[in-house]
Amino acid sequence: MKPFKYIPQLDAFVLTEEYQRVASYLGIVGWEQYAWIGRLFTLDNDYGEHWMDNWELRELKAKEAEALGYDESELLIIDPDRFQNGKDGPCHTDEIRKLFWISVLDSLVLSPEMIIAEARQQNERSKHIGDYIEDLEERIKEVLS
């Protein structure tokens, strides 16, 4: 399943409707729908949860987004500077880093098993904060059928 849809007119991504529907049903909600993917791309740590925290870039595209039927809060914008840390590099220009990540995210497909594994992990963590989904395994069966 493709989690991201690229919108060239906005030079931004949004989450696909299918992915949002499945992720939400399995308990992956809000910013976690893309934050967990960012963590995996960035050495599996919480730095990655901020990979799309580009509020100022979203604000610049608000009117354009609205004209195309999107809310600016949906926009996921690649900021190439977030994909380098200045240690022993950067080795590529901002333009190349941005083109690389657009290409990667535009072609990214996650297996149902991957999304389910993440849902189970997040659900396990939720046991102590009240967002636990008792019937997650039944929901998983439904998604797989």
Image (tube, helix red, strand yellow):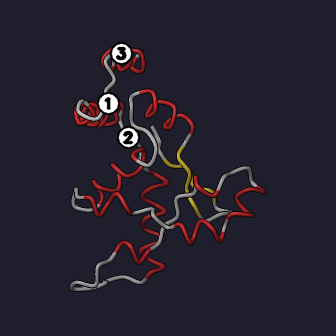
**What residue lies at 52% left-to-right and 58% top-to-bottom?**
76
101 and 20: which is toward the camera: 20
Q: Nearer the N terminus, badge 2 or badge 1?
A: 2
**How many labels, in total?**
3
Residue on which the image places disc 1: 130
Q: Is residue 100 above or below residue 21?
A: below
Residue on which the image places disc 3: 141
**What residue lies at 73% left-to-right and 63% top-to-bottom?**
64
Q: Is residue 113 left or right of residue 29?
A: left
Q: Is residue 63 above or below residue 135?
A: below
Residue on which the image places disc 2: 110
Q: Mark 2–mark 1 contact, CB under 8 Å?
A: no
Give, as a three-letter code, the residue at label 3.
Lys
Give, as a three-letter code, the residue at label 1.
Gly
Q: Quadrant of the N terminus?
A: top left
Tell me the tag on residue 99.
Answer: none
Q: Residues within 10 Å of mark 1 (few under 14, many from 20)?
A: few
Q: Is residue 52 left or right of residue 16?
A: left
Say which element carries label 2. Answer: loop
Q: Which percent across, then down, holds residue 46?
A: 27, 59
The Cα atoms of the two marked residues, 2 and 1, are separated by 27 Å
Say which element carries label 3. Answer: helix
